C-alpha cells in the first residue's frame, strides 16, 4: 500500500509479504513501481544501529533520494523541510516491512526505537563521492529544527519546540 505524507515526496510503501511454511518472500524494490519510485538506484548501503542510537541530521543538495528498508528492529525516520518547518515522522520496523522514500533535499535522520539493534538497507539514487560528499550536516540535537507541524498535525505537543529525538511516546 502506497502512502503519501504531508511533506511532498515523502512516501511509504508496504511490501507484499508472501508467507509459506518456510517463512516468507517479499519483493523489496522493483523498477516498475513507478507510482513509488521516480528514479533508479545506483548504490545500496547497510546501516546497523544500537538501541536508542540517533543518526541525524543531514541532507543532500544534488538530487539524491534515499529509500530505507528496516530489516531488523524498528526505527523512527524523520524528514524536515527548513523553509516551511514541516516534519514527517515514520516508524518503520521489520515486523511490518515497508520502503520509506525521503527526498535528499530535506534534512533527515533516524533513531533506533526498538529494544534491539536495527539493521537497515538503504538504496540511494546518487553514488557517494568520497572526494566531494553531497552532505550538509547538522548536530542531532540542533535547536534550530523546530517543527510547525508533524505529519500534518499542528496540535502535536512537540510542535513549536526544538526537535527531541527522545521525547517519550504519547497518544
Image (spheres, rainbow, N blue to C red):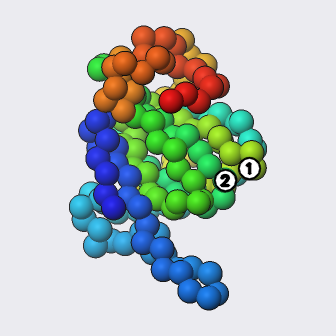
* SS under mark 1: loop
Residue at x-position 43% and y-position 66%: 15
Query: Which of the image's four quarters has the N terminus?
Result: bottom left
| Residue 1 falls left or right of residue 121 | left
Q: Nearer the viewer, residue 57 or 96?
A: 96
Q: Is residue 147 left or right of residue 132?
A: left
Residue 123 sits above or below residue 167 on the image: below
Report helix, strand or loop for mark 2: loop
**What is the CA distance from the residue labelled 2 to the residue labelled 1?**
6 Å
Q: Is residue 93 above or below residue 145?
A: below
Residue nearest the observer in this picture, 129 or 68: 68
Contact, CB < 8 Å: mark 2 with mark 1? yes
What is the total number of numbered labels drawn onto the structure image?
Answer: 2
Left or right? Give the position of 3 relative to 124.
left
Instruction: Say which quarter of the image contains residue 40.
Output: bottom left
Residues packed near mark 2 inside 10 Å, few (<14), some (14 to 19) or many (20 plus): many
Earlier in the chain: of badge 2 and badge 1, it is 2
What is the x, y in percent for residue 116?
75, 50
The residue indicated by pointer 2 is 73
The picture places residue 124, in percent across and down from the top left corner, at 45, 54
Identified at 66% across, 58% down, the residue is 72
Q: Nearer the viewer, residue 5 or 57?
A: 5
Q: Which residue is mark 1?
A: 117
- Residue drawn at 62 percent across, 49 percent down: 74
- Assess disc 1: are there few (<14), some (14-19) or many (≥20) residues with their C-alpha within 10 Å of its C-alpha: some
The answer to which image quadrant residue 94 occupies is bottom right
170 to 1, vertically: above or below: above
Amino acid at each position: 500500500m502506497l502512502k503519501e505524507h504531508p511533506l511532498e515526496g515523502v512516501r511509504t510503501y508496504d511490501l507484499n509479504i508472501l508467507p509459506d511454511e518456510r517463512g516468507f518472500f517479499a519483493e523489496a524494490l522493483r523498477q516498475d513501481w513507478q507510482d513509488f519510485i521516480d528514479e533508479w538506484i545506483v548504490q545500496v548501503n547497510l546501516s546497523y544501529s544500537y538501541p536508542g542510537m540517533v543518526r541525524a541530521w543531514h541532507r543532500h543538495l544534488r538530487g539524491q533520494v534515499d529509500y530505507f528498508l528496516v530489516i531488523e528492529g524498528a526505527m523512527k525516520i524523520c524528514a524536515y523541510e527548513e523553509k516551511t518547518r514541516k516534519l514527517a515522522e515514520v516508524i518503520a520496523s521489520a515486523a511490518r516491512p515497508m520502503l520509506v522514500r525521503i527526498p535528499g533535499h530535506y534534512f533527515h535522520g533516524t533513531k533506533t526505537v526498538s529494544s534491539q539493534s536495527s539493521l537497515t538497507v538503504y538504496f540511494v539514487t546518487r553514488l557517494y563521492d568520497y572526494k566531494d560528499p553531497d552532505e550538509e550536516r547538522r548536530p542531532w540535537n540542533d535547536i534550530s529544527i523546530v517543527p510547525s507541524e508533524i505529519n500534518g498535525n499542528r496540535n502535536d505537543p512537540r510542535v513549536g519546540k526544538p526537535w527531541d529525538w527522545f521525547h517519550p511516546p504519547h497518544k
